[in-house]
Amino acid sequence: MSRENVGRYLMAFLCCAAGMSAMMVRPLARAVPATSPQDSVNATYAALGGDKLKTISLKARWEQFDPGESYSVSDPAKPDTGVSDLVQSRDLQRGFARNEWIRPKADDGAKRTYTEIVTPTAGYVIGNDATNGRLPKRTVNGAQPEHTMSGRRLTATLRELERPFIVMGMKRHPDRVAAIGDQTIAGKAYPAVQYRDDYGAYIVMFDPATNLPARVRTLDWDALEGDSSFDAEYSDWRDVSGAKIAFHTLYTLNGMRVADLKLSSVMVNPALPPKTFDIPQAMLTAAAKSAPANATPYQWIIRRQFTGFYYDSDAKYTDDLDALKLVDVARNVSQTQGGTHNTLFIATNSYLIAVEAPNDDGQAIQSMDMAKKKYPGKSIRYLILTHHHVDHVGGMRTYAAEGATVVVGKGDGDYFRRVLARPETLNPDAPKKAFTPKVAEVDGKWSVNDGGREVNAYLVENPHAADMMIVYVPDAKLGIVTDLYVPGAPVPPTAMVAALVKGVDKWGIKPERFAGGHGSVGPYADVAKAAQNAPAGN
């Protein structure tokens, strides 16, 4: 990351943080203290016993949450995204790490067992780190799958490895430390400094009673929340061989839980086997270098890895060797394909209706450009979001900035008005023009008809999201569904499939096919048949 880009990032970091709520940083709220930043770093380094920390090994358990994947917008912590177990070995002087993971595999309830080896110049994964269909094409399949990390994943991983031992970096690089005023959180003032490295910018807050790090904050862009405060809060400090280690770390996004990390054992300065951090030469040669911090969607990468729904690609929306394309699925209905998440475009006589705005504004820009070429002269008047999950709504600002009314399920109106109004200065693909959000909330059924084509959206009860809707285009006998099943793939006999059929029956619609926010297009008869075999409570 160039010094110019670092400077821009820091400026955005400070400007955005200054406008956040009481839960967040107010960087210039108090005068810069007389103590120099390096004096603060030196005091904390001494309190940690930094000279004693050369290598470390630990065992930990992560309780995981994704505020963007909750059942309801009213409770971002439910459901959680499971528990991960971690065995970690680190060479703190060389910046090397080995992470041995056992993590949930959300698509089938199994476990993912894999190892990451991370150095400042390369990332390598051996084992199955993704749900079905998410392993990149560069994966080499032998006894176990193995692949290099994308540059974006490497940057995000290196930043999060830096966070718990950030004082070590500040001690080595005093030129990257700058003064900042005390930070006030929940009425308590914390002495603090700014720090920057190749992976981003941080505000590091110290416990005034112990000099130990209390909280390390980055300002991250989140596709739902916009510019956001991402914190690691440290507690349960224990002495291990003369060094202080935090045995509990709580990670939050704008005060919402993201991860709760508890260490079960720690060894300071263990003798690590010589091959602990070895990366095969062929993989090392092919490995991507770390991506610029301002091009890295940290929250997406961190949280999608909790469940395995992460596509480790620098193309972001597709595999590195693929591209998005627009495919006709009915008369004047088109679907983006080629990635993991789709948008549907429905052309009426007068305008376009988009269904879903997946991933982020970068994909929205690509999808909208294709739709405008396909349907010249038609503006996008409505964006229907079938439910609030971040992977299907992250590009909504691009459509809102074009003047589209955002159509959401019952109970979501105020939430979407709030997040659409939040600043989004850290997203390089954010809309450049200001807009006033227009949000329509659906209670039961929503319908439009321009005299040439009718389009309807219906709320359906289901176990996936409280606000879930399906869309129906009567003249095409085409339904549109997201997450309840994946059209084009075999239809499993699940509770979500049964919920879809129940919703179709409730509203009296007659789809012959469904197109998906995932997948492609499939016959409804297969869905109805699978629902008959869905066990009660499945």
Image (cartoon, rainbow, N blue to C red):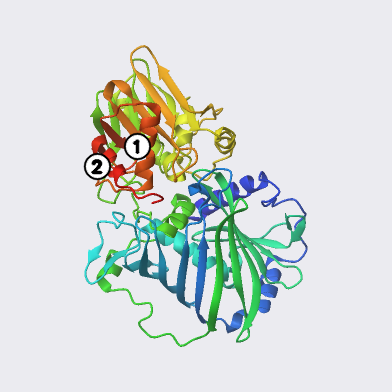
x and y percent of residue 280 in the render?
28, 74
- Foreground residue among 430 and 264: 264
Residue 421 seen anywhere in this rendered image of the structure: yes
Q: How many labels does the image show?
A: 2
Q: Nearer the viewer, mark 2 or mark 1?
A: 1
- Foreground residue among 364 and 391: 391
Answer with the quarter of the image where residue 243 lies. bottom right
Find disc 2 in the rendering and name its residue.
Answer: 488
* Residue at 33% from the left image edge and 24% from the top image edge: 473
Q: Is residue 253 above or below residue 193?
A: above
Residue 486 seen anywhere in this rendered image of the structure: no
Circle 1 crowding by C-alpha within 10 Å: few under 14, some 14–19, many from 20: some
x and y percent of residue 498 in the render?
36, 42
**Disc 2 and disc 1 in contact, CB within 8 angstroms:** no
x and y percent of residue 378 in the render?
36, 20
Mark 2 → mark 1, Cα distance in angstroms: 17 Å
Circle 2 crowding by C-alpha within 10 Å: few under 14, some 14–19, many from 20: some
What mark, if any, has residue 395 been given in the picture?
Answer: none
- Foreground residue among 205 and 403: 403
Q: Compare marks 2 and 1 and give the one earlier in the sequence.
A: 2
Q: The residue under label 1 is which amino acid type? A: Val
Answer with the quarter of the image where residue 218 lies. bottom right
Q: The residue under label 2 is which amino acid type? A: Gly
Tell which residue pokes out farthest to the left in this image: 142
- Foreground residue among 166 and 396: 396
x and y percent of residue 21 in the render?
68, 46
* Residue at 36% from the left image edge and 65% from the top image edge: 112
SS label for mark 2: loop
Find disc 1 in the rendering and name its residue.
Answer: 501
* Residue at 48% from the left image edge and 51% from the top image edge: 294
SS label for mark 1: helix
